[in-house]
Structure formats: C-alpha cells, structure tokens
Amino acid sequence: MNSVHSDLKVAIVVADIAIVLIVGSLLIMLFRRLKQPPVIGEITAGIVLGPSLLGLLPGDVTGFLFPAELRPHLSMISQVGLLLFMFLVGWEFNGQLLKRRSGSVASVSLSAIALAFTLGIGAAALLYDRHDVVDGERVSFGYFAAFLGIAMSITAFPVLARLLTETGLARTRVGALSLAAAALDDVMAWTLLAFIVVIFGAGGDGTGTLVAVLGLFLLYVALMVFGVRPLLRRLVARIIRGGTASPFLVPLIAAGAFLSAYATSWIGVHAVFGAFAFGLVMPREPRALLAESLHIPLESATRLLLPIFFIVTGLNVDIGALGWTGLGELAIIMVAACVGKLVAAGIAARLSGMNWQESYAVGLLMNTRGLTELVILNIGLSLGVLDGEMFTMMVLMALLTTAMAVPLLPKGLPRAPGGLFGVPSVTVPFGATTRRAPAQGDAADSAPTGHEVPSGKS
C-alpha cells in the first residue's frame, strides 16, 4: 500500500507540473498578443491556479489539484529551476555595461535606489501595525522596513533586457542607460539583501553568531573570487578543446551552482545568493561555444522548471482576502514603488542630458520588477518577514509595475533592431535578431554586444 501511495504521490506531482506548463503556455501566448513579456503570463498563471481565482470555485479545486501535503515537493522542484535561473542571471551580468556613461549610470541607479528605499521605509511605517506579526512571531520594524525598502529598490534586470529587445530599444541610449543602471541597481540591492538576511537569520542568536556568519560570508566571497574563478577558467579551458565541448560541461557547471547554493545556505545566507555568485565568476569565453553547449541547455531546463516556481508563489497569493483595507494598502505600495523609480531615475536621466521623453522612458523601464521581485518576496516569506496579505500585495505590485512598462512607453522614442548580448538567454527571448545592427544615436551610448550566435525559437 505504501508503494502504491508513493507512486500516486509522484503521479499527482507530475500531473500538477503538466497543468502548470499548459496553463502557463496558454497565458504567455495571450499576453504576447497584448505586447506583454512572458513573465506576466507566467506570474498570472500562478495566481490563476491559486486561491485567488481557481480557489473561488466550489469544491476547493485548488486544494484538489495541488494537495497541501504535496506542495513541499513542488517547492523543492521549483528551487532547482530557480537556482539555475539565478546562475544564468549572474553569468549574464555584463560589467562592460557599467563602463559606458558611468557617471549617468551611477546617478540614475543610486537616485532610484535611494528614493525607492526611502519610500519603502515610509510605506513600512504606515503598514507595520497591521503586518507586524507573522505566524505568531512579532517581526521587528527594522527588518520589516529594510525588507520593504529593498523590495521597492529592485529592478528586474532579466525582464528589462527582454523588454528592451522586444521594443527595439536595446541598442539605443535609453536602453543602454536603463539596462546599465538596472545592473548596478540589482548588484547593490542583492548585496544589501544578503547582509539583511544574514543579520535577520542570526538576530536571535546573539552578536557572536552574527559576526561568525558575516565572517563566513566574506570568506565565501573571497574564495569565489580568488579560488573558484581561476579554477573555473582552467576547467572550461580543459573541457573545451578543439572547438567542441565535453558532454560533462553542463552537469559539472550545474553541480557547481548547486554546491555554491548549498554553501551560502549552510553559512546562513539564502541559497539563491550562492547560485548567483557562481554565475558571476563563471567564464564568459569562448562566448559562442559556451552559448551553444551550456547556456541553451540550462535555459531549456529553466523554461521547464521555473513555471513551477510561479505556481508555488501563486498558491500563497490570495487577492480575495485583501478586502478594501488591503486594496488601500496596495495603493500605498504602488505609489511608493512607482514614484521611487519613475521620479528619481527620470530626473537623474534628465540631468545627464536626456530630454524629458527619454528621461520618462528610463524611469518607466527602471520600474519593472517581474521575476526578480518574486525571488526576493519568497525569501521574505520563508524568513517570516512578510505575512500572507503583505506577500499578496507585493506580488501584485511586481505584476503591475512590470505590466505597465510597455503600454506607457512614449511612442516617439528612437528604435533600433538588434539584441543585447552575444549569448541567447532568459533575458533575451529566443528568436531575437542575432545580427548586429547599427543603433540610432551615439554609438557610445549603445548597449555593448559580443559575437552574436544563433538562437532557438520560442
């Protein structure tokens, strides 16, 4: 009986994954017609299958399709896709973006983070009294405010890169400045979040534990930079010989990302930081060969596994439970999120020499959050910083701020064909133009590209 019961559990989990993939694919096709990025369809699929919509039907359809006892299995599977995604985000980080117009990039990024973080703390002050207890434990205002500030500050670098390519802005100065500022923004936000997670995780165990965790984390960073990075260069050079890659490349690199995630989790920092850091130290050359032999297989894996992450997120989102008070709080969150990015980034872009139309576009693009925001929110949920209502409102904020970008972009912006990177990626949709094309405007303001390689078809 136990064997049959175990087999049935596996069958239900597999069927759940099939449902998620089908619904996600249908909604992606729908939202593509509305000029929205795929992540909007994927997030919406998770919400649709959760208590917010499917759960409203009689008979507890959501509970029947996704039994509570099996949700931890879905969560564990989703973490595999999430870690691979975070590795790819780290690997795709292009430091060259920050070298062009560095003064403008720094001013836009720092201004957006400063105002968004400040407004996030202000929103926390207004909302704290209704969300200060999570699972029976009181959350300190400091952690709650810091977390909301970071969540407001983030810009979804992968989603932004995809939007820029699909709108023809990738190789214009608006696109170049937005993407570079988003890259710097995310690195600073992730670094700050890592330290907040360390402090929160060790907060109840005394100063000694906090110092130990911080020390181990800094040691980990040093080992990644001075030990793992050169070892990876030698490994890649050894595996890739004669213009071909060994079939062991994908499993070895994936294993490295997972072990790095385990290391940061063991230290007391969330596993996603380890996968992200492993991507940062991963060699980028030979670009075309690594794109074909490593990047495409890993991205294919994320396309299958990441939708599970969205349903795990959607099962924790219950829009119907918000009520009128919750909708009022959502309005506060939306104002803080949008003003923090639109106003600060827009004014900084204007001061850097752009006209008002371009400056507004930069602010609007910096306001996209998407999947990166969901990763941060899930960290907050797992740490017990966010309760269910706050989690729901923040997920809706991520969805709305991302969805509003394309429809609200000015129509008269210069457009230029071409993608962003020489590596087809989760940040650039399959089927995007692979040949380099001259950008309009100043070439020095264009997004840098490498050797373009053919990509698959979405």
Image: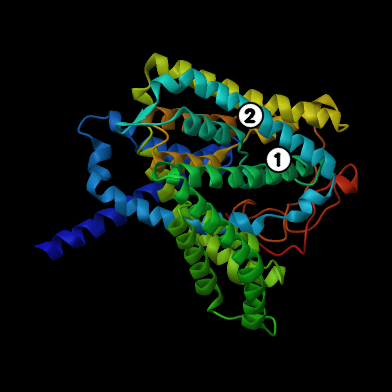
Residue at screen point 45% across, 56% down: 265
**Disc ID at residue 331:** none
Q: Residues under labels 2 and 1: Cα distance?
A: 25 Å
- The residue that mark 1 highlights is 167
- Residue visible at 66% across and 68% down in the picture: 226
Residue closer to the observer: 385 or 392: 385
Q: Where is residue 409 drawn, in percent x and y?
A: 71, 30
Earlier in the chain: of badge 2 and badge 1, it is 2
User: Quadrant where the C terminus lies?
Assistant: bottom right
Check the picture and name the quadrant holding the N terminus.
bottom left
Image check: 164 left or right of 73?
A: right
Q: Residue furthest bottom?
A: 242
Q: Amino acid at mark 2?
A: Ala
- The percent coordinates of residue 387 (x first, y second) are 38, 31
Check disc 2 and report the residue beneath it. 116
Question: What is the quadrant of residue 448 in the picture?
Answer: bottom right
Q: Nearer the viewer, mark 2 or mark 1?
A: 2
